[in-house]
Image (spheres, rainbow, N blue to C red):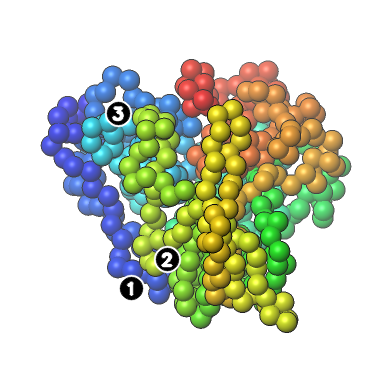
Amino acid sequence: MGKVTGFKEFKRQNETYTPVKDRVKHYKEFTVPLSNEEITKQGSRCMDCGIPFCHSGCPLGNLIPDFNHMVHQGEWQKASWILHSTNNFPEFTGRLCPAPCEQSCVLGLIEDPVSIENIEKMIVERAFKEGWIKPQPPKTRTGKTIAIVGSGPAGLAAAQQLNRAGHTVTVFERDDEIGGLLRYGIPNFKMEKEIIDRRLRILEAEGITFKTNVNVGVNYDVEELKAFNAVVLCGGATERRSLPTPGIDADGVVQAMDFLTQQTKVLFGKKVENQVLATDKHVIVIGGGDTGSDCVGTSNRQGAKSVVNFEIMPKPPGHRSPTTPWPFWPLQLKTSSSHEEGVERNWLINTKEFITDENNKLTALKTVNVEWKMVPGERPQLIEIEGTEKTWPCDLALLALGFTGPENTLADRLGIKTDARSNYKAAYGKYQTNIPNIFTAGDMRRGQSLIVWAISEGREAARQVDIYLMGKSDLPTKDEAGDLVALH
């Protein structure tokens, strides 16, 4: 490494945020970037660790020590080239990825790990600012045509890779804008949508065609897909989980993704009928993950009277649990910037009933505290604790419970087999469904997962499509051993 003792000389520094009182007044990003001098020091913290476990921690197999070294050397353009060699969209992962690479960083054994995610973000932002990221259209075309269904990170990654191989690519998106959950499922204060649009301008200039408001199987006949030499299904896992709870149909019980999507659409001047607002309401967010956190931040920006968060699982420890030792993803309490903006968090609590008035409008939630009974060899049992029932005032309950899997309408119409969890089945490592020219990638294949996995899936599926069409491929792939480590 450029500075062998850097990890001993410099402490981890994270980018900071603007004050809560200021940032809750708007929906723009509110991070304060580190100076070039400071980010260079952060790159210098990367150790000469011998075996960089961050490689296996990253589903993309990013060459992390290499771009850290370039940042330390001040070779930003080289750092950008290295970063983009394995990651099509580091501006997305640098903002939204939970950074499993950092949790497997060797330095994390004795100190705070290297700030890999922030370095990644700084590299790509510098690259855009300097004009280093330019369209790279293929020199020749193969004459093969490919349809990508779904424009989330998996679909966009597959599209760019296949276009680079010289194929003619068309991306179909059922919504009115490109980006999938990046566009409407992620609040603007976490990623402003111009971040997506500037990358789309690059992709369009490279020759990729995008078609919005096209819902394949609904307003676009699946028979028309036969005109393409290959199809890649990247529709995501969009079936939302609900609760088998009395009163679930009350006016005021809303799926989190509907709530978040509406706010983003309104922010950009799109017409939304009967927008659900948290303004002057007692809001309860059910679900403690990232989507629940996004609902907390959005509710506070809308002017909620109070915001409460329920989670049915136990409160994680403040430090890495012994049950998830390094280099595994840790069981550990996560406090997001949205949590810091104001929320009452509750663990081991279960909703028993949504209470309504005579007009079926939500007025309160009835809950009970719970505990988990663990018996070796058996599934954990949820036990209610007697005498812990409580009624909470609530005008708006947001269900942030994750997704059960992809919608199967398209699978049924195309004759594609699915597994027990409703995911679209594909041959291991081939991303190929039971219909030879139809492939699938991302959450539609693996179930609800991380953005970094979606990009990885899109890239790997693209290579398999290229091999299917041409008999071989020059598109890059992750090292097979790295694949196995990352998968397990």
**Residue 324, position in %: x, y?**
41, 33
Image-quadrant location for residue 456: top right
How many neighbours does mark 1 have within 10 angstroms: few (below 14), some (14-19), or many (20 or more)? few
Comparing 470 with 27, the one in front is 27
For the residues labelled 1 and 3, the Cα–Cα distance comes to: 37 Å
Image side of residue 378 versus residue 108, left or right: right
Q: Mark 3 falls on what kind of element?
A: helix
Question: CA–CA distance between discs 2 and 3?
Answer: 34 Å
Residue at label 2? 343
**Quarter assignment of residue 66:** top left
* Image x and y of residue 321, in percent: 37, 37
Q: Amino acid at mark 1?
A: Lys
Q: Secondary structure at mark 1?
A: helix
Find residue 21 and name its label: 1
Residue type pointed to by label 2: Val
Please report whichever mark, 1 or 3, sits nearer to the chain's N-terminal start: 1
What residue is rendered at 56% in x and 70% in y?
Answer: 391
Q: Is residue 50 left or right of residue 95?
A: left
- Which residue has dot 3 on it? 106
**Above or below, comparing residue 309 to residue 235 in the picture:** below
User: Could you say whether the residue bearing mark 2 is in a helix, strand or loop?
Assistant: loop
